[in-house]
């Protein structure tokens, strides 16, 4: 496990539960607006050219054994663990690690970009996650530009379908980055994914982004986010706006 960060207590990351949050390093996307760029390994990708000034909030490496011991002690105060990143489904030891968390026992929430439906399906079949949050970055046509990789949108759709059929609680999340996320994009997303339980809109924050040029974007006014929410309620049971 490539555990790079630990938040001991969170009241907001796992709906209805007091949790600890684990940040796993590594990601297969290069999202322009990413707030945790220091969790993405440096490479020769063109998007990396302006990363010299990034200071890391995740300077430590935690062993799985250390984290499991911590969680056992912490289980008197928390009832959940959030596995986030980076992209957790890239870890080859994720399954075995979650099995150990289950033994404590603690509830588990997984945050993912949805690019690995085989992993998500396997975790669901073993009953290793209780809640999942899947990022929907934008509409299919804009995905490659926003994530700066050749993204297979159908894999994301497969992950969402698995969650819809699983019976567990889940949410979809979109960070509302101007230009990359518009009402027209949500109309296209609706056509792709159909009805869902819960959809969360996240306000864009223009600080410490993977692509420094995105810091020049002005976040949408709350009124625009409210307009998005009205439309999203046409295909989601619940729509929340976060970060305002």
Image (tube, grey):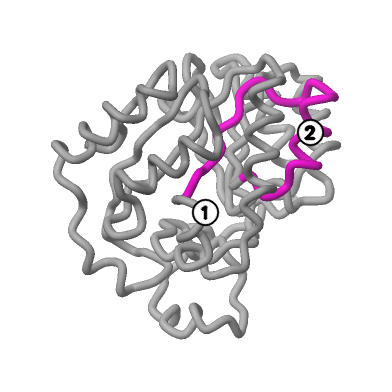
Q: Residue at x 60, y 14 (%)?
A: 76
Residue 31: x percent and y percent? 48, 62
Q: Residue 126 magenta-drawn?
A: yes
Look at the picture and state if 59 lies above or below 211: above
Is tag 2's residue or tag 1's residue first in the polypeptide sequence?
Answer: 2
Report which residue position mark 1 lands on.
Answer: 140
Secondary-structure class at tag 1: helix
Where on the picture, by quarter, is residue 152?
Answer: bottom right
User: Could you tell me which residue is drawn at 67 percent across and 50 percent down?
Assistant: 115
Depicted 4 relative to depicted 104: above or below = below
Q: Is residue 11 magenta?
A: no
Q: Residues within 10 Å of mark 1 (few under 14, many from 20)?
A: some
Query: What percent of the width, then of the height, locates residue 206?
Result: 27, 59
Range of residues picked out in magenta? 114-137
Observer-nearest of 44 and 229: 229
- Separation of residues labelled 2 and 1 (CA atoms): 22 Å
Tag of residue 121: 2
């Amino acid at each position: 496990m490539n555990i790079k960060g630990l938040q001991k207590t969170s009241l907001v990351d796992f709906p209805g539960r007091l949790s600890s949050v684990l940040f796993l390093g590594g990601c297969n996307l290069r999202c322009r607006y990413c707030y945790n760029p220091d969790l993405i390994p440096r490479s020769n990708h063109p998007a990396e050219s302006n990363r010299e000034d990034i200071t890391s909030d995740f300077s430590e490496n935690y062993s799985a054994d250390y984290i499991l011991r911590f969680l056992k002690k912490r289980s008197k105060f928390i009832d959940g663990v959030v596995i986030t990143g980076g992209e957790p489904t890239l870890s080859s030891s994720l399954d075995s690690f979650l099995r150990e968390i289950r033994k404590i026992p603690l509830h588990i929430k997984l945050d993912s970009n949805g690019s690995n439906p085989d992993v998500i399906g396997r975790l669901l079949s073993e009953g290793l996650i209780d809640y999942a949050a899947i990022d929907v970055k934008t509409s299919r046509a804009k995905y490659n530009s926003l994530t700066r990789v050749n993204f297979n949108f159908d894999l994301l759709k497969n992950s969402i379908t698995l969650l819809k059929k699983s019976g567990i609680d889940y949410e979809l999340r979109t960070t509302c980055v101007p230009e990359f996320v518009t009402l027209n994009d949500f109309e296209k997303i609706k056509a792709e994914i159909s009805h869902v339980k819960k959809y969360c809109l996240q306000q864009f924050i223009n600080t410490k982004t993977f692509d420094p040029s995105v810091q020049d974007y002005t976040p949408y006014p709350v009124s625009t986010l409210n307009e998005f929410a009205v439309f999203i309620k046409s295909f989601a049971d619940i729509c929340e706006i976060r970060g305002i």
